[in-house]
Amino acid sequence: MVRVLVVVTRRIAESALNTLLGRFEVRLYDSDEPPSRCWLESNIGDADGVVCTLSDRFDSELFKKAERLKVLSSMSVGLDHVDLDAATMRGVYVTYTPDVLTDATADLTWALLLGVARRVSEAERFLRGGLWRVAWAPNMFLGSDVYGKTLGIVGMGRIGYAVAKRARGFDMQILYYQRRRLSEDVEKVIGARYVELDELLRRSDFVSIHLPLTEQTRGLINEERLRLMKPTAYLINTSRGAVIDEAALIKALKDGWIRGVALDVYSVEPLSKDNQLLRFENVLLTPHIGSATTETRKRMAELAVDNLTAVLIGRLPLHLANPDVVRIRPLG
């Protein structure tokens, strides 16, 4: 029987791992920490398939070392950690896991939006720090209303759409911007109005970013655009950190251009302990947990395994990021 080796770069849900163990030889990096570049280079040379995460950077040099690799299955919706052109040139199928994390990420977006608007993190630190000495005061921890305000969504894909659906329960006016406008029928269903990005930034009380990281979106929210926002507005990002110019964001916070920020993603992850974002009380920060529910991470792992298995048995996977690869290495 032909040996088929699959490398798994992180601990994943037991159900997904057991599926792999039942069909292939598995080499697991048995840790919640990411493997080093050296480990990857040393362990993928004889691999037929790899299950990776967004923390594992697969560039052209790494693909050169993976001489047998047929499929790279990423347990993520974004693929900015993978050189898709290099993968395609070498006949490597790259798959990903959209859809299954949509609702979990939309829920966290709302947790961040509500949390920063109502100063939940500040208030909890105040309480836990033993500083709560007056039971109630008219001006204590005044936040901002959410109900009836204007929400601007930058990127109305699956997650942006799910965020917009939740906003209807708060009777919000919904503005959105993306390169391609939705159909009028879809806009009516969700109750959203298309505007250009600068207008969205000027008019929104809350701006929520839901964009992939590309050359076009890197640094999209820069100093010029941050200056357009209301001084009472909040910025929320659960997509990719580098969509925001972090230096400009820190300047905006120092100078009071906006009222608050809530972030789950950063230009460099993990966030350094001396990052200036940690100094602001009006900044709510979480460690890239958008999809971090037991149910969602299990579905992501299982979908990643399904995608990988499909390619290794000669079938098209459900979610293929580089369809041109079929011409380089046909399945069958």
Image: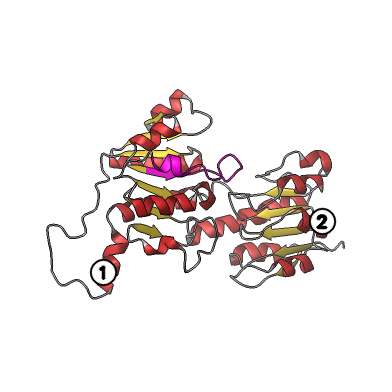
- Whether residue 115 appears in this view of the structure is yes
Question: Where in the figure is residue 199, as x and y percent of width and height?
Answer: 39, 31
Left or right: where does residue 79 sit relative to residue 288? right
Q: Which amino acid does label 1 sit on?
A: Phe
Question: Where in the figure is residue 111, as x and y percent of width and height?
Answer: 36, 54
The relative height of residue 310 versus residue 169 in the rendered view (above or below) is below
The 10 Å Cα crowd at callout 2, few under 14, some 14 to 19, many 20 or more, is some
Kindly identify which residue carries mark 1. Answer: 126
Task: State which region is magenta.
Answer: 207-227
Kindly identify which residue carries mark 2. Answer: 64
* Mark closer to the chain start, 2 or 1: 2
Numbered disc 1: secondary structure: helix
Q: Which residue lies furthest to the right in this view?
A: 1
Numbered disc 2: secondary structure: helix
- Whether residue 22 appears in this view of the structure is no
C-alpha gap between disc 2 and disc 1: 53 Å
Where the C terminus falls, by quadrant? top right
- For the residue pair 292 and 224, the one nearer the viewer reads as 224
Q: Residue at x 53, y 45 (%)?
A: 219
Q: Residue at x 60, y 50 (%)?
A: 97
> Does residue 272 belong to the magenta stretch?
no
- For the residue pair 221 and 192, the one nearer the viewer reads as 221
Question: Where in the figure is residue 301, as x and y percent of width and height?
Answer: 60, 58
Q: Look at the numbered discs 2 and 1 and tell me whether their residues touch, using CB distance below 8 Å.
A: no
- For the residue pair 254 and 102, the one nearer the viewer reads as 254
Question: Where in the figure is residue 209, as x and y percent of width and height?
Answer: 46, 44
Q: Which residue is drawn at 49% across and 39% down?
A: 155
> Does residue 216 belong to the magenta stretch?
yes
The relative height of residue 56 versus residue 149 in the rendered view (above or below) is below
The relative height of residue 41 versus residue 223 in the rendered view (above or below) is below
